[in-house]
Image: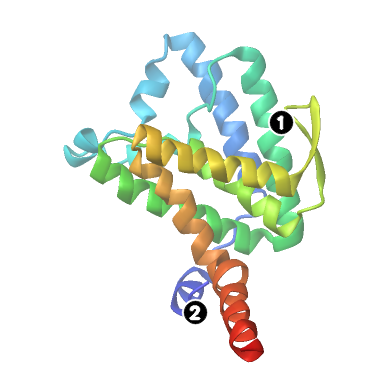
Amino acid sequence: MNYKLRRALNKISLPGLMTYICFAQGLVYVANLLTGGNVGAAMSFSAPLIMQGEVWRAFTFLFEPVNTNPIWIVVSIIFYTSIGRTVETVWGSDKLTHFIIVGWFFTVILGMISGSAHNYYVFLSLIMVCGTVCPRENVNLYMVLPIEMRYLGMAYAAILVIFLIVRRDITALAPIAAYLVFFGRSQIFAPLINKIKHRNFRN
């Protein structure tokens, strides 16, 4: 990650952040059931409404439930809480907090350009992170299918590309940008440079 960005975020650390976000999603889901979806409607991301002064939407969309099915909302909360705890164990709460903030920032910027955004991409990016820092970690996908995190991370990265190309959803660039901020040098550029150097040496 860029040194100046690291210094700017250095003092921000929220232990258990993903647990709190997932728990908040559960509360919002219940609130939606009681209010006919009015709570979620007031929290969702909308660039026009944000420009009209409803700036809280740039933050509260993170707490929207990622699913509306009661079974899948429980499964999703358990799954993403587990992913968050795994990444936090390896990275520490400060770095995970920084990653979520960066992912949120890119999502908001691109959402303001496209007009809408959803927290799904922020969660999806965590799968890519977990697949990088814990590649051989086994997880039961939605508590059913056992799979190594590296394969799950690659699958979700492919989904991002599909959304970007087929749906032409530019907000799908947000998790890619966040990932590159934290892993671009070590996972992409450094191996590429070493490969070029090795090829030149052989020639």
Q: In the picture shown, does residue 198 fall above or below 167?
A: below
Q: Give residue 45's position: percent from left, percent from top.
A: 34, 34
Q: In the picture shown, does residue 195 fall above or below 175?
A: below
The quarter of the picture where residue 148 lies is: top right
Mark 2 element type: helix
Q: In the picture shown, does residue 201 fall above or below 165?
A: below
Which disc number belongs to residue 171? Answer: none
Q: Give residue 165's position: percent from left, percent from top.
A: 39, 39
What type is the residue that disc 1 sits on? Ile
Q: Nearer the viewer, residue 70 or 111?
A: 111
Q: Nearer the viewer, residue 162 or 38?
A: 162
Q: Give residue 2's position: percent from left, percent from top.
A: 48, 75
What type is the residue that disc 2 sits on? Tyr
Verify CB contact (< 8 Å) between mark 2 and mark 1: no
Q: Is residue 92 left or right of residue 121?
A: right
Where is mark 1, residue-wise? 78
Where is mark 2, residue-wise? 3
Which quadrant would the C terminus be assigned to in this image? Answer: bottom right
Mark 1 element type: helix
Q: Is there any visible trace of residue 153 in the rendered image?
A: yes
